[in-house]
Image: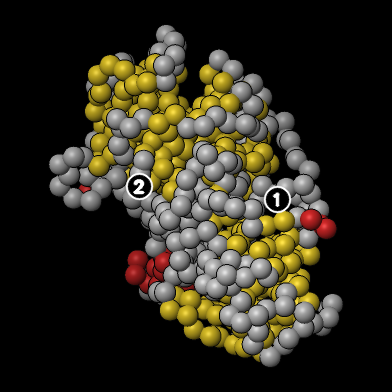
Amino acid sequence: MFTNPVIPGFHPDPSVCRVGADYYLVTSSFEWFPGVPIFHSRDLVHWRQLGHVLDRPSQLALDGVRPSGGIFAPTIRHHDGVFYMITTLMDEPGNFLVTATDPAGPWSDPIWFPETRGFDPSLLFDDDGRAWMCGAREKAAKQYDGDTEIWLRELDLTTMKLVGEEHVIWEPVQRGGIWAEGPHIYLVNGRYYLLTSEGGTAEGHAIMVARADQITGPYEPNPRNPILTHRHLGLRHPITSTGHPDLVQTQDGDWWSVLLATRPYGGPASGPLTMAAVRADSGYNLGRETFLTSVHWEDDWPVYDLVQPEMPAPALPVHHWPAVPACDHFDGPRLSPAWNHLRTPREPYWSLADSRLTLSLRPQTLTEWGNPSLIARRQQHMDFAAHTVLEFQPQGAESAGLALIQNDEYQIRFARSAHGLTLIRRASGVDTVVATTESHAGRTWLGVEAHGQDYRFRYAEAPGEWRDLGGPVDGRLLSSTTSGGFTGTMIALYATSNGTPTTNTASFDWFEYQPI
């Protein structure tokens, strides 16, 4: 058996490819840098992060991008010894492709396709040596938001240019006909199969399939569409919003699919339930995560199994990777791939000298569309504890500490300033001070412990002498059901001069994250 999700926390829009006995997977990263985390597995269940595809500023300019803008829905494929990753930088300049011979990198600088528009591009390398690109876009004369179509065009691998005629091969057919997106085309037993998602990425998400004898169509929809959705399972099902899948065939001939889904928690356990109540009372703090389910074929159509918290594992040799330590002592030459920056860093504001993380205070803050002095990792469990120790002598309006971030308007900051320690809840762009203390120790231990939607913050001025600061903070403000957007909660170490230039720094000796 295995436990879903296979990659927990904010890892949406998964795409997977197999090379021999090795599987490689990428996910969306939106406004976070480096872009497009890449993972490696040998059993489809246990994944280790190799790094990121877009790890250089020359590859990815996220300056000033809106929350939940940036990188949408990457696709990874392998052909003739080369890995290809194609994705979209929203809102401009659009679709691009990078290549590598080693999935761990380095990856090339982007090859742009300015003649395309839309999002969610994908690739198919056909048996006749030709390559094809497809993607989703809203219609030029759309009649409503989400009035989309799927387009297809040939890609010349020598010139890396799109050639030939463009074909519109699909329009949404699901109820309401909204947001046909996430297209992938597969060649299986001489037929072309188009896999898409429709209905939006929330509880109405659904997977559709169509097939054709020629890649350009016409495509015949499966009469049993949608072939996977959880919308009929009710609002208390532990897994919702299933969609945006990618298929992979194992070396033994079995079929599996990765896909995104969400795990709402914190809502009412009983009583009358409506969609409005779910959105008000529960949260998706972990964002959209990567799940795995089995697929078999009937009448030459793929049949998906419902996505369960526990499922029979693939018939592959179990392959565990060495466990990642719960505590990062910042004693390596570079940051762990678990850490991210908010938008593209244009200057080295962090240092790992002397086995500690030192952040230079800069004017940028967490409440604007900038690149603040911050590193962040994903919240990956409903119940977790995170701790760090901060050395900092604040001056004026300077502050540094621990933050939980959904976006610039929804966050919780646990900060040290010249006035002491302050716990701030930010919702709809408005800061509310939850609690303060006049602690002025130069070395301060900071922690947050989450039990479901109750986030409790504590501090210490000597090892082990922990004190609570205020009562529990309701974590639902960190869910996209409250804040909007497509991302999940990030746990950050940060420092800011709040608009005033300074040479001051803040240091963190270590950071520990573990489920509880």
Counting other residues with Cα less than 10 Å from the Cα at mark 1, is it few (<14), some (14-19), or many (20 or more)? some
Q: Which residue in the structure is indicated by mark 2?
A: 91
Quadrant in which residue 391 is drawn: bottom right
The picture places residue 173, in percent across and down from the top left corner, at: 24, 39
Q: Is residue 72 visible?
A: yes
Q: Quadrant of the N terminus?
A: top right
Question: From the viewer's perspective, is 49 left or right of 99?
Answer: right
Kindly identify the amino acid type of the residue bearing the numbered disc 1.
Leu
Give SS at disc 2: loop
- Identify whether 165 is placed above or below 103: above
Kindly identify the amino acid type of the residue bearing the numbered disc 2.
Asp
Q: Which residue in the structure is indicated by mark 1?
A: 335
Question: From the viewer's perspective, is 250 left or right of 513?
Answer: left
- Identify whether 41 is placed above or below 237: above
Badge count: 2
Name the residue rendered at 64%, 73% in the picture.
Answer: 400
